[in-house]
Amino acid sequence: MNKAAKNIIIILITFLAISAIFALLNPQALQKSNEVSLSSLAQQINQASIKEIQVSGDKIIAVDNQGKKIASRKETGVSLNDSLKALGVNEETLKPVNIKIEEEKQGVMGWLFPLSLILPIVIFVLFFWLIARQARGGGMGQGFNFLKTPAKLFGDGKDDKKTEKVTFDDIAGIEEAKDEIKEVVDFLKNPKKYQALGARIPRGVLLVGPPGVGKTLLARCVANEAKVPFFSMVGSEFIELFVGVGASRTRALFQEAKKHQPCILFIDELDAIGKMRMPGMGGGHEEREQTLNQILAEMDGFERDTNIIILGATNKPESLDPALLRPGRFDRRVVLDLPDIKGREEILQIHCKGKPLDPDAKIIEVAERTPGFSGADLANLVNEAAILAAKKNKTAISQTELLESIEKVLLGPERKSHLLSEKEKEISAYHEAGHALMATSLPHAEDVRKISIVARGMAAGYTLSLPKQEKRIKTKSEFLAELAVLLSGYTAERLTYNELSTGAANDLKKASELARDLVTKYGMAKFGPIVFGVRDSMTFLGWEQETEKNYSEKTANEIDEEIARFIREAEAVAVKILTQKKAMLIKIAKVLIEKETIEKEEFEELINIVKRVGTKKRV
């Protein structure tokens, strides 16, 4: 039972107890069951049955000859004698009766009556106070302080052994970004050195890069290296239901930062509030726009000697408002890119610290197999390897777990419950064998590292291919080889069974997109160096779409024909090679059906054996 429920139960019990006390102390509850009317009492006095009468205010207690007490009540403001005379009691009959007049006592109800007026008010005030206190302690607390900044403060610029410290030694794979950001650290440590020369350090530093490359980690590293307070806030935390809250929180954030300067303000996901302002969209009272305007105003208000650095992080720099990026605001851009093989090796070494590794574990081989992985992906990879080793009750992480975790991160866990039929297993084996054989046969294709028909994630099978050498630029020959490899699974199925299946659907989609890019984006078609279509893209998110056609319908038809030509030529290459090497295709597929997984070394040995056998037969 939570605290709020306990408070409500206590208040309800208090209400019931007070109600019971009022009921017990009610005057009518205290009256005797033998109370009679005043006329009946007068009749008994006339019959000489009453020997004593006690009067207290309007209350009358009479005692008869047998000593029994009789309760009654007279009219307010009228004496007892007058009341009895009106009822036919004469003075002669009343003389033997001993009448005692007592002062009326307040009793319990004398002080309980005013208390009954005050006590309910006190209880209601207490009830709402408890509810309000509970709300402030829970999720509704934002309703009471929503104008304050929700920024989290990490450290106060002093050495604190209880908090985790991140240094430049804990970050790898982004050496150029580290070198550039060290200037910010040096400025926060020695601001006078720069001010003496009239230099002005950038007020805002924008960290740009794909998700998981370490933008937030680098910002925390700057705070720890400079030993200054670090305020962290996400862009979406500025915006609330109420109008004007974002601007108010921005003012509160900068006021708090000025109290702790020198310090760092880190705004993660800056694009949530810094998107480009569009004319005629939303108007001047739009909440996000007001928040952005307030941030721009606060950054302009910095004095030359203000030691506050604002770090912003985003993976969509193209969507930011130009006013944020002009000199004097976020005028320095630090790009964090995906790590190369050396960077991946260093990152893996960092994340493997404190974890027991088998002597057979080869970090460099893991780095070779993970092109395109970010720092967060590699951290997840090492963690998955540790989990796999723990499941197997091992005391150290071996190379097997590290390599298996690569596939788990890329494709998902093995779907052991997803059992293929013999026919499906055979089709999948020929499909993957076609991919592998084509990749081996083309000089510009990627190397085959592993072939498997074990279902993972949404894939019934997969061929893991990696580039021979990491590169940023791809040639047309490499694109055409990739097209042929993509269509080789489809071709292998058709050559073997003279039938098609749905297994090649994803390959055909990728091939069609690649062929369209060759024509409209890379200028590798018959049109020459021309790009077709206006595109809207998210640089680091890999998302792109054509937003406007800047070509005629005739050109659109020619583009479609050129795309079809690339597909047909790639298919022809696949048909030619797989037809010539059909015996090798069948051999690879049979081994794959038997073992389900073939590693690089075994695959290369299998290719060499088939080649030697074919050479002997020709001789």
Image (cartoon, grey):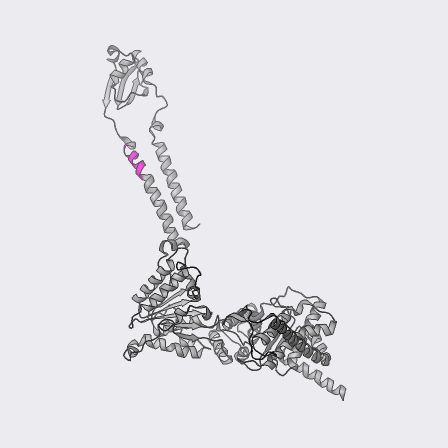
| Count of numbered circles on the image | 0
Question: Residue 127 occupies which quadrant of the picture?
Answer: top left
Q: Is residue 108 visible?
A: yes
Q: Is residue 583 left or right of residue 555?
A: right
Indicate the position of residue 157 as horizontal and vertical percent values.
33, 70
Residue at the image position 72 percent from the left and 72 percent from the top: 494
Outermost residue toward the bottom? 619
Quadrant in the picture for residue 580: bottom right
Tell me if residue 400 is in the magenta stretch. no
To which quarter of the image does residue 301 belong? bottom left
Instruction: Measuring from the top left, give residue 19's x and y in whole percent.
Output: 37, 36
Give the x, y percent position of residue 248.
Answer: 35, 59
Q: Nearer the viewer, residue 439 or 60?
A: 439
Q: Is residue 290 above or below residue 356?
A: above
Which residues, given as a range, are shown in magenta?
110-118
Which secondary structure type mostly characterizes the magenta part of the structure? helix
